[in-house]
Image (cartoon, grey):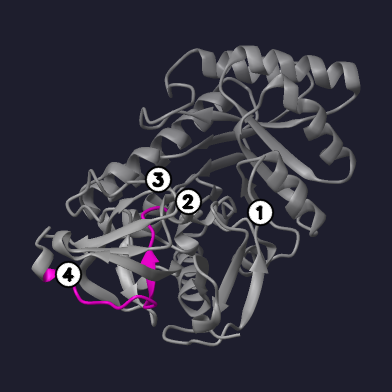
Amino acid sequence: MRLTELETPALVLDQAKMDRNIARMREHLARLGVAFRPHVKTPKAIDVVRRMISNPAGPITVSTLKEADYFFGHGISDILYAVGITPNKLDHVARLMGAGARLKIILDNEEAAHAVVAYGRDNGVKFEVLIEIDCDGHRSGVKPDAPELITIGRVLHEGGTTLTGVMTHAGSSYNCTSVEGIRAMAKQERSLAVHCAERLRAAGLPCPVVSIGSSPTATYAQDLSGVTEVRAGVFVFFDLVMAGIDVCKQDDIALSVLTTVIGHQRDRGWIITDAGWMAMSRDRGTAAQKVDQGYGVVCDVQGSPIKDLIMAQANQEHGVLAHRSGDPAQTPKLPVGTLLRILPNHACATGAQHDRYHVLESSGAEDIAAVWPRFSGW
């Protein structure tokens, strides 16, 4: 099948760009001397993840236990579940471990630690647990100098659970406005994670793993001494948010949504397409950046951006394309039936709207080289 024969909207993946993104990240982290544990929440597809890992068994990072089930079912056994564990998920974790998965969990509070210890004691399960650290005030985690770090560590270690280490995620790096800012965040992420590991060790507690990561900080990290592994995910496809903070170029974005022109509102300078927010997602992550890309940057069917044409508005099944100036006279004349490709703000969110990738071997190709299934949900 050719790209021009697809019903739209459809998710398109440029394999050559994806492979370059993967190779660049691997080589960078290898130079820094750390292991790579890629986050697979972005692709949610075994055909992509096999290209992200160097060993068939992993390691990988997941954000749902459904992901853990799926990838373990495809032979990947070394898995970090990087969302704080809750008691109602411990049965599921234990089942995966019983089947042979080396599944590690995380937590950031004493209540969860006691729940894990109690479940392990009552059910004969020895969980591997990392303590989540808050390195930037972005989301979850124990404050680096909080006494709770040692308290949680002792609850886990003395309760018979394997205290595996610490992990953190510099989510605030997505809000940086310069490369220098990202480099500073990468330094902060590393130093605070290492500091917490040293605190645990000084208290007589084990901390073999120091796990950090985000695509921005992984890309611009210059020194990872004391870190044992790095996690990153969106780098595999990249997106407009990453391009907006100079983590990638627009030409590195491997994911796009194929759409068709279905009509016009010429007096407003609108081109109407059959891909709305159900195809693109509602993510407006570039709205707070220097350049607001609306719901996505519009490209021709070969994937080349059309100057200053964006998806300015989105309804459920309708996308409204317009010149970013808002001047109707600047909107190009694109006939009904014209095929276009939209670069997404957030690759994870856009991918989640679709159940398959239509794979092109390289930029400008029109033959569909493969169709790779993907999944979503919990």
In the displayed structure image, the side of residue 83 where residue 21 appears, left or right? left
The residue that mark 2 highlights is 278
Within the magenta stretch, is there residue 331? Answer: yes
The circle drawn on residue 93 is none
Q: Which quadrant of the figure contains the N terminus?
A: bottom right
The stretch of residues the image draws in magenta is 330-346
| Secondary structure beneath label 3 | loop
Q: Which quadrant of the figure contains the C terminus?
A: top right
Dot 4 amino acid type: Thr
Give the number of the mark in front: 3 or 4.
4
Give the number of the mark in front: 2 or 1.
2
In three-dimensional space, the C-alpha distance between marks 2 and 1, rounded to whole angstroms, equals 16 Å
Kindly indicate whether the residue at mark 1 contacts the one at mark 2 (C-beta within 8 angstroms): no
Instruction: Kindly identify the residue that appears in the image at 53 percent across and 32 percent down.
Output: 197
In the displayed structure image, the side of residue 343 where residue 8 appears, left or right? right
Q: Quadrant of residue 99?
A: top right
Few, some or many residues within 10 Å of mark 2 (<14, 14–19, 20+): some
Give the number of the mark in front: 1 or 4.
4
The circle drawn on residue 282 is 3
Dot 1 amino acid type: Phe
Instruction: Kindly identify the residue that appears in the image at 61 percent across and 17 percent down.
Output: 152
- Point out residue 17 in the picture as x, y percentages from the top left corner: 45, 75
Name the N-terminal-most of marks 4 and 2: 2
The residue that mark 4 highlights is 331
Kindly indicate whether the residue at mark 2 contacts the one at mark 4 (C-beta within 8 angstroms): no
The residue that mark 1 highlights is 375
Name the N-terminal-most of marks 2 and 1: 2
Kindly indicate whether the residue at mark 4 contacts the one at mark 1 (C-beta within 8 angstroms): no
In three-dimensional space, the C-alpha distance between marks 1 and 4, rounded to whole angstroms, equals 36 Å
